[in-house]
Image (cartoon, grey):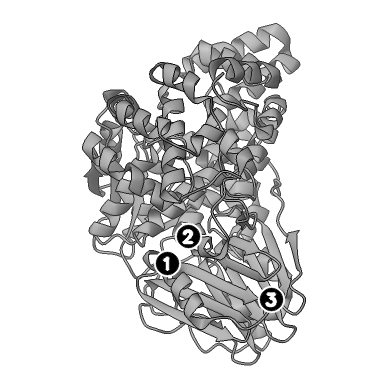
């Protein structure tokens, strides 16, 4: 870290150490035992739980935990666990786990990165530990601090604790929802799981949620609510806990974390150094592992920054090169292979590439829907799917990824609207024009700037456009989150809050979790270390988007480590699939499935759609096709 930055913010550095754990390079002793997994639980509100049912529904996510399993049933409560071993590959820390002193049981999916510091603190309070697992630390933290334990964790988690002392089930999900927690709550049973497939056998029949299907068809929006596409199956929202009174069957949900900038914003000169320190420390924590670690590398700024910093740290504790995996597009317009190659060469990475073609896509599309369980807005996530498959086949069990960089540092072009309006308010027309020119010089087209200034900021205009363009939809109304987004376009930080909590990040995290865990891969996201998020949000818009350059502090922070062609890239792609090639070639097959879909007939005027289908934009064709496949695969019925 630069000396000026250190002098500027001693409080932040202290916060890094408190929240982050050891500051020495990662050690490889058997002190750390993490098990990223799949979980399940069932509470029967009318009688005893069937242990065989718990066994079966736990094993539906065996792919999430291929290294072991455990089930515990006591009366009307059953807990299940599938284990993916990451650190210390022994059987210590098996789950469900019981506290040694109290009748308190846990099933847990995730990692608490600062558990060593929490363990030391709990030991000073008189707690004794019998394993070296973070699971036992989590359990002790709950017994010591109750719900307040969540405020002390730095990591990703989804867990349920059966506290037999008061016969309650306490469940919680991490701040940003990296780890999933699905649940069903009816008059006769409460059940939770890591994936929807575990809960489908517990509902009467799979029924589509009309609102979510309509929102998806209009614009591809998903994961913007605590509901799922399946009526009756919900998600515990990120940053929330739930407590179920097992005797009465009544539950309560409460928010424990609200997204807010908590670190003082700093000046332009020191922001880059502080940002790099926070990112580097987040990466250090996420490199702890007793299995091979690598990273996803697209060639963009975010993934290149993570790969570069991780490779430097990884070299301190390993005699092999750090692995990086790139999905290469066969469409030249979005092929980033040359950028990734430059980063791989400079950081001396062990670089792996995968290049799926149309035949791979055509044969995998339905399997992807099976993996994701809910519709998704385009085939680009197949590129991520292929990266995860390549990682597993090469023995890379942990992958770092760059999710969250754009949302925290104003990385999307749509943020320019608020930035331009800031210049207009502070310096009038002349200041606005200077900023507009700077943005175009940084690579943003004037048409895109005007679109976000006038199109995205008007909910009425956007809604009218959808009604005109997609007249065959029976309900082409603008989704409510996009109305809020239109209001937020005048405020960059307001847009960030909306995208992190609702309109963008939750969707990306769902894709990431499902794709990675399908192959038993754990992904870790340094940009979503809560300390980094809170610091980045506190930075003024004029610093995050400076002189026309999005993510300016990160560019400056990495300027001495990355090739300049990466640091000052003007285009933005990011693991994009060759949509134009694949979907054009696949259009006839998509048409056949769409027109035959009984579920889609509820949402579209089929005679009109038949006439228009091949003139529709490729994105809409895909969305129709995806809903048709989803309805077939999961036998989804209309309400």
**Dot 2, crowdedness within 10 Å: few (<14), some or many (≥20)?**
some
Vertical position of residue 391 compared to residue 468: above or below: below
Could you tell me which residue is drawn at 34 percent across and 37 percent down? 299
Task: Pinpoint residue 468: horizontal percent, then vertical percent.
Answer: 58, 14
On screen, residue 630 versus residue 584, left or right, reads right
Quarter occupied by residue 452: top right
Identified at 46% across, 33% down, the residue is 623
Image point 58% across, 66% down: which residue? 192
Q: Earlier in the sequence, mark 2 or mark 1?
A: 1
* Secondary structure state at the residue bearing disc 2: helix
Say whether residue 522 is visible: yes
Is residue 296 visible from the viewing direction of this image?
no
**Separation (CA) of disc 2 from disc 1:** 7 Å
Disc 3 to disc 2, how far (Cα)? Answer: 21 Å
Quadrant assignment, res 505:
top right
Crowding at label 1, few (<14), some or many (≥20) Cα neighbours within 10 Å?
Answer: some
Mark 3 vs 2: CB contact within 8 A? no
Quickly name the residue at label 2: 197
Q: Nearer the viewer, residue 123 or 225?
A: 225
Mark number, residue 60: 1
Q: Earlier in the sequence, mark 3 or mark 2?
A: 3
Residue 248 versus residue 19: which sits nearer the camera?
A: 248
Asked if labels 1 and 2 touch by Cβ distance under 8 angstroms, the answer is: yes
Q: Nearer the viewer, mark 3 or mark 1?
A: 3
Q: Mark 3 highlights which residue?
A: 45
Disc number for residue 212: none
Q: Position of residue 450 (x, y in %)?
A: 58, 12
């Amino acid at each position: 870290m630069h000396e000026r930055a250190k002098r500027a913010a001693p409080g932040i550095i202290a916060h890094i150490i408190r929240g982050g754990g050891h500051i020495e390079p990662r050690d490889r002793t058997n002190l750390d035992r993490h098990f990223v997994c799949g979980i399940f639980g069932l509470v029967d509100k009318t009688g005893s739980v069937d242990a065989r049912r718990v066994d079966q529904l736990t094993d539906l996510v065996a792919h999430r935990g291929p290294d072991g399993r455990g089930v515990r049933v006591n009366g009307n409560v059953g807990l299940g666990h599938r284990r993916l071993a990451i650190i210390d590959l022994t059987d210590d820390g098996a789950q469900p786990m019981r506290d040694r002193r109290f009748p308190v049981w846990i099933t847990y999916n995730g990692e608490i990165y600062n558990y060593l510091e929490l363990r030391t603190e709990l030991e000073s309070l008189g707690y004794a530990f019998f394993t070296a697992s973070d699971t036992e630390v989590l359990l002790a933290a709950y017994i010591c601090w109750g719900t307040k334990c969540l405020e002390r964790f730095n990591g990703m988690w989804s867990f349920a604790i059966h506290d037999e002392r008061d016969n309650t089930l306490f469940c919680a999900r991490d701040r940003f929802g990296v780890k999933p927690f699905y649940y069903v709550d009816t008059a006769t049973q409460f059940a939770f799981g890591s994936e929807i497939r575990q809960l489908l056998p517990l509902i009467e029949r799979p029924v589509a949620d009309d609102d979510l299907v309509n929102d998806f068809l209009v614009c591809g929006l998903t994961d913007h609510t605590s509901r799922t596409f399946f009526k009756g199956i919900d998600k515990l929202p990120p940053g929330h806990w739930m407590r179920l009174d097992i005797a009465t069957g009544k539950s309560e949900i409460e928010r424990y974390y609200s997204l807010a900038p908590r670190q003082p914003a700093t000046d332009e000169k020191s922001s880059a150094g502080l940002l790099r320190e926070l990112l580097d420390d987040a990466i250090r924590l996420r490199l702890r592992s007793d299995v091979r670690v690598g990273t996803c590398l697209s060639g963009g700024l975010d993934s290149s920054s993570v790969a570069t910093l991780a490779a430097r740290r990884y070299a301190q504790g390993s005699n092999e090169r750090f692995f990086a995996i790139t999905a290469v597009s066969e469409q030249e317009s979005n092929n980033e292979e040359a950028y990734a190659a430059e980063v791989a060469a400079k950081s001396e990475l062990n670089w792996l590439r995968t290049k799926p073609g149309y035949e791979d896509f055509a044969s995998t599309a339905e399997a992807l829907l099976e993996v994701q369980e809910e519709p998704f807005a385009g085939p680009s996530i197949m590129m991520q799917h292929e990266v995860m498959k390549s990682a597993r086949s090469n023995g890379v069990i942990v992958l770092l990824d760059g999710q969250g960089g754009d949302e925290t540092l104003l990385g999307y072009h749509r943020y320019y609207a608020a930035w331009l309006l800031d210049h207009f308010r502070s310096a009038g027309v002349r200041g606005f024009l200077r900023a507009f020119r700077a943005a175009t010089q940084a690579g943003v087209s004037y048409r895109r700037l005007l679109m976000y200034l006038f199109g995205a900021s008007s909910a009425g205009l956007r809604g009218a456009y959808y009604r005109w363009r997609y007249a065959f939809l029976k309900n082409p109304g603008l989704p409510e989150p996009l109305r809020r987004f239109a209001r937020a376009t005048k405020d960059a930080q307001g847009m960030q809050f909306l995208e992190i909590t609702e309109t963008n990040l939750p969707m990306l995290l769902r894709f990431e979790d499902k794709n990675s865990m399908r192959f038993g891969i754990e992904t870790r996201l340094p940009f979503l270390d809560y300390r980094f998020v809170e610091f980045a949000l506190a930075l003024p818009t004029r610093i995050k988007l400076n002189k026309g350059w999005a993510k300016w502090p990160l560019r400056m922070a990495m300027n001495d480590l990355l090739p300049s062609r990466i640091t000052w890239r003007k285009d933005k792609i990011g693991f994009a699939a060759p949509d134009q090639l694949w979907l054009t070639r696949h259009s006839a097959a998509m048409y056949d499935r769409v027109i035959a879909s009984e579920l889609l007939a509820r949402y579209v005027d089929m005679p009109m759609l038949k006439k228009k289908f091949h003139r529709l934009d490729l994105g809409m064709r895909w969305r129709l096709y995806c809903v048709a496949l989803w309805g077939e695969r999961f036998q989804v019925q209309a309400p």
